[in-house]
Amino acid sequence: MWSMGISVMAFVIIYIARWIYKWRNPPSNGSKLPPGSMGLPLIGETLQFFIPSKSLDMPPFVKNRIQKYGTMFKTSLAGRPVVVSSDADFNYFILQQEGKLVELWYLDSFAELLGQNGSLKEGFLGFIHKHLKKLISEHFGPERLKGKLLPQLEEMVNRALHAWTVHDSVEVKHESSTMILDFTSKLLFGYDAEKQGQSLSETFASFIQGLFSFPLNIPGTAFHRCLQNQKKIFNIIRETMEERRTSPAKSREDFLDHLMEDMKAQNALTDDLVTFVIFALLLATSETVPSTLTLAIKLLTEHPLVMQELVKENEEIIRSRENKESGITWKEYKSMTFTMHVINEALRMSGSVGILRRTIEDIYVNGYTIPKGWTIMIVPSSLHLNSEIYKDPLTFNPWRWKDLGPNVRAKNFIPFGGGMRSCGGAEFSKVLIAVFLHVLVTKYRWANVKEGEIVRTPMLGFGDGHYIKVSKKPEDGECHV
């Protein structure tokens, strides 16, 4: 019996050891994989990936491995083999290979949370890839901004900042997210937060908290709460669609109306896909722009010379107007050179978590092979904080953008992605931030009440929140930050 027990135990130990060896050394068809570690079985290096840092620097998970392995390394996140790249040329190449060597991809937790699986994923990769950008451009692009959205954005910002002055303090990211989500949800599917008595911002904030959590769907986990919030938002969108079907004669001419009209001619465009599209666009506006705005306010407070130059440019715009009470024009927006430098610098330093693609063919690069079916993660912060491109990358220096040419930006500045899937709402986001800064620095002053501590998880956060007190600017016109 003892010998049998020892034999069984030895077999189990050998089996586990072999399994661990195979995990740590994934098959590569005889080719050389990039250097790196696959971490622990099943969970890989997921826990290390989510360790928070209190710096604007790139996430330690990425930075430490770049120092150890170079600009490309392998790892495993949430049970999936991943190659992380900080190589600007390779990243630029990959972003041009949509539908050829790579396809859009989310890790399993993202895919389930975003609803991108099965036929929905197929529809997203097909219909949306070809059609959505056109619709986004029609509703949020330069022509729509010039003719209709610019004054609406200014009105939104004026109303929001005036409301901020009533409070002893406001948490910038939360209030910015509420302002933007209330605006975009109305544009996208007619959701009026005032009439409904509820903003979607709280639901999205809870959703985002679990977006990068381990995909364990049991009550009490962040992932489970994420799924519940996802269902809540999906139901609101679906209910709106049903209401419009019952009163088809009432045209609102918003984004949802156009999608529902397209459903009559596009078999691939289902209720589920329309719901996902609206949800994805709301998600895109609920995190990146509020984080960038909050960081910009924090950095402007810390850099009075930048603030002085920003105020000077924007007050000159007002002084040059024939009618001082008129709103921002498109020509004025395009003249905001230094304001755009500030926006680019805030976008550069806020970074984003990662751009994911899955290989549909083996890819050969620098003597390595990235096998078919693996995920490629492009980490924008590794490009945006590269000291070879951006001198003193952790220093807030908007003036650096005067000397950065378009070729440098094309490969080393990707806050809105790149290639065929670059963000169709990029111009809308930049106009929104520019309008917000213009109104803020010309009409208001602010003071820190509680300075939010920078936290990357790897998303950019501000600890317990960045609180400011906003008040009307004195009549003498001085900045008084």
Image (cartoon, rainbow, N blue to C red):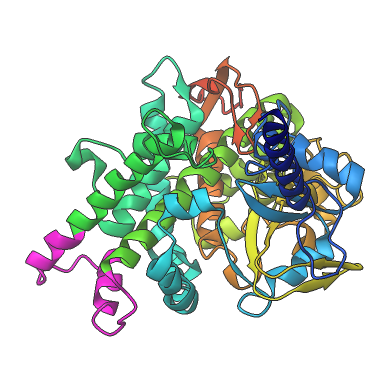
Residue at x-position 53% and y-position 20%: 464
Residue 133 percent coordinates (x, y): 48, 72
Q: Is residue 148 above or below residue 54?
A: below
Residue at x-position 55% and y-position 57%: 106
Q: Is residue 111 left or right of residue 156?
A: right
Q: Is residue 284 above or below residue 419?
A: above
- Between residues 13 and 426, which one lies in front from this camera angle? 13
Does residue 216 appear anywhere in the picture?
A: yes
Check the picture and name the quadrant holding the N terminus: top right
Check the picture and name the quadrant holding the C terminus: top right
Q: In this view, does 108 lie above or below 40?
A: below
Residue 452 percent coordinates (x, y): 60, 21
Residue 137 percent coordinates (x, y): 46, 70
Residue 73 percent coordinates (x, y): 82, 52
Q: Is residue 130 left or right of residue 202?
A: right
Q: In this view, does 463 lie above or below 218?
A: above
- Between residues 393 and 459, which one lies in front from this camera angle? 459
Residue at x-position 45% and y-position 44%: 286
State the image quarter where residue 206 is shown: top left
State the image quarter where residue 197 is shown: top left
Residue at x-position 56% and y-position 48%: 434
Does residue 339 appear anywhere in the picture?
A: no
Q: Is residue 184 left or right of residue 423?
A: left
Q: Residue furthest bottom?
A: 265
State the image quarter where residue 16 is shown: top right
Q: Which residue lies furthest to the front in this view?
A: 1
- Between residues 369 and 319, which one lies in front from this camera angle? 369
Q: Does the magenta stretch include residue 260?
A: yes
Total numbered labels placed on residues in the image: 0
Q: Is residue 134 magenta?
A: no
User: Residues in magenta?
Assistant: 241-270
